Image (cartoon, helix red, strand yellow):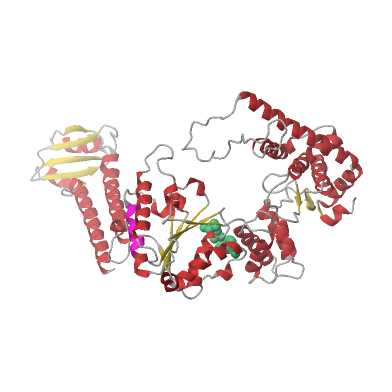
Amino acid sequence: MKHSTRGYNQYFVMIIILLLGLVFINSCQKNRVEYTRAALIQDLEAGEVTEVIIHQNRETPTGYLDIDLKTKGDRTLYATDIRELEELVRSYGVEPQVLDVEPEPWFFTSVLPVLIVVIVGVFMFVMMNAQNAGGGNSSRMMNFGKSRARLSVVGEGKITLKDVAGLKEEKEELQEIIDFLREPGKFTRVGARIPKGVLLEGPPGTGKTLLAKAIAGEANVPFFSISGSDFVEMFVGVGASRVRDLFEDAKRHAPCIVFIDEIDAVARRRGTGMGGGHDEREQTLNQLLVEMDGFGVNEGIIVMAATNRVDILDPAILRPGRFDRKVAVGAPDVGGREDILRVHARNKPLSDDVDLKQIAQTTAGFTGADLENLLNEAAINAAKENRVYVAQEDIKKAFIKVGIGTEKKSRIISDKEKKITAYHEAGHAILFHVLPDVGPVYTVSIIPTGIGAAGYTMPLPEKDEMFLTKGKMLQDIMVSLGGRIAEEIIFDDITTGASSDIQKATKVARKMVTRFGMSQNIGVINYDESDDEVFIGRDLAHTRSHSEAIAGEIDKEVKAIIDDCYARAKSIITEHESVLHKAAALLLEREKITRAEFEALF
Ligand code: ADP
Ligand code: MG
Ligand code: ZN
């Protein structure tokens, strides 16, 4: 620290000297011997003035001017009136010489020097900062190659498997890793080979990072974590040296866990990507593979990595002796969601009306991170209303906020719009209620959401499905079309409000035809090419694998499915037209109705 302070002072002194120098030069130009008007008259009377040179600025003839007097020496008088002075000098018999002077460009005389000083100063400051930021006596510029891994010390506040809710199978799969880290001898004794690398794969927010930390916590070993994007820096060669550094550190601390989060940033399939120029990443990946091959089996280092894009990983990374253990971390099921809610409700006092089980049922598709966010929003809401417990009302509000956008009662919508929305949502709701494999309805609302939906009808799925049946998919399409159908029946006119419904229905129908083999005429063949769309680099030239004739046939099938669903849905809604009217009226009155209120209408 001492060293860097001195460095700081040196530069400071240099800047001051520079500034003083400039001031000095500037003043030298102007500061000749001072002369007054009275002194001039005195000298004229004494007959000592031999020569007068008036430096007159053409731009400002009556303005500022200097006069050089050839007396005993050079003197300058600054005057404001030339003519008066000229006459004064002439009256003593001296003929003044008048020289025209170009005005000095102000930019060069006053702005430029200051500018130079400022630029030099700023440059030095930046340099200094770059050198000092590294801290201690090592400068940061020299330090780019060092690993940025964070070593979390085991001990207080550590995360254990108790903090990871759900994920039962995943935890079981990882149990042997924990056992190994705790007691390596037990495994090496019988010659068992423990995987070097474990790849956690799953959508964002499902708890991969959490799980890796929990394993380190559970086994009580050091945890080195680094994110894949940390490897990819601006200087070539840095990534590779970081990897080397990281593993050197890890070897010293074995047994331990090295966790590489978002490994897809480095371990992308090589030789791909648009525009090339990914040598840096390739070098980093190669170094990683070299390191993983380099340390022996059972050396006590377990490399864990997480990704949500296992499909874009370089296959080399998945070879035996590298990440040969893959653990899929999926979105939680109903039970898992309830467990996760319980974990995050531990430090939040809940009121009696909060039913975590029921929340879990309404949150199909939510990840652990979403659920954590949900409860947090609810707690914030409770705090805003100065309550010391979280009520069901808070959770409802949070649900709408995280799930659908912010509830906006303030937006003014016309009565007509409101009415259309009410019938539209009631149409969805009736189908949810009547059709056996979808729904039941949890809430119906015509309160506009923050993200542009005029209303929503939320189902309450009673179980998570492993796979969809054809019947359920058809019913999903019918439900999607229900809004539009209700509009058509009641208003004899239709709106643009159903566009996302239509899009959804079409998507499902197309998938049924091209992917799931659920149509008669197309048969059980996959024509779905949307798989790798994200991965532009690999197949930039996207080619269709089937003929125009098949494409036409697919379109025909999709249309047939939609048309059929439309007709069936329309007959159901027409059959329950009285409910449609009642539901819409109730919605217009209350803006939002619950399952019980809705079902009472039948
Ligand atoms: P990922 O790494 O898969 O993107 P994280 O592990 O970072 O997800 O999870 C983000 C947050 O979500 C965690 O900090 C935790 O609060 C919450 N979370 C996710 N999954 C779970 C779970 N199974 N149990 C408890 N909390 C979870
Ligand atoms: Mg993560
Ligand atoms: Zn709709």
Residue 282 position in % (x across, y down): 37, 47
Look at 31% across and 54% down and name the residue there.
Answer: 126
Look at the image and tell me whether residue 133 can be seen: no
Q: Quadrant of ligand 1?
A: bottom right
What's drawn in magenta, residue-wise? 238-248
Q: Nearer the viewer, residue 170 or 351?
A: 170
**Secondary structure mostly taken by the magenta-highlighted segment of the chain:** helix
Q: Nearer the viewer, residue 533 or 391?
A: 533
Look at 32% across and 61% down and name the residue there.
Answer: 134
Q: Judge from the rendering whether residue 573 lies leftward or rightward of residue 478; answer left or right.
A: right
Q: Quadrant of residue 473?
A: top right
Residue that extends furthest to the left in the rendered view of this protein: 72
Q: Quadrant of residue 89?
A: top left
Residue 195 position in % (x across, y down): 45, 61
Q: Nearer the viewer, residue 354 or 586?
A: 354
Residue 152 position in % (x across, y down): 44, 68
Compared to 266, does 211 lie above or below?
A: below
Can you say which quadrant of the picture contains the N terminus? bottom left
Residue 246 lies in magenta, yes or no? yes
Look at the image and tell me whether residue 349 can be seen: yes
Q: Judge from the rendering whether residue 183 lies leftward or rightward of residue 442; answer left or right.
A: left
Residue 494 lies in magenta, yes or no? no
Residue that extends furthest to the front in the rendered view of this protein: 190
Residue 338 position in % (x across, y down): 68, 64
Q: Quadrant of residue 163?
A: bottom right
Residue that extends furthest to the bottom in the rendered view of this protein: 156
Q: Judge from the rendering whether residue 601 lies leftward or rightward of residue 378; answer left or right.
A: right
Residue that extends furthest to the right in the rendered view of this protein: 578
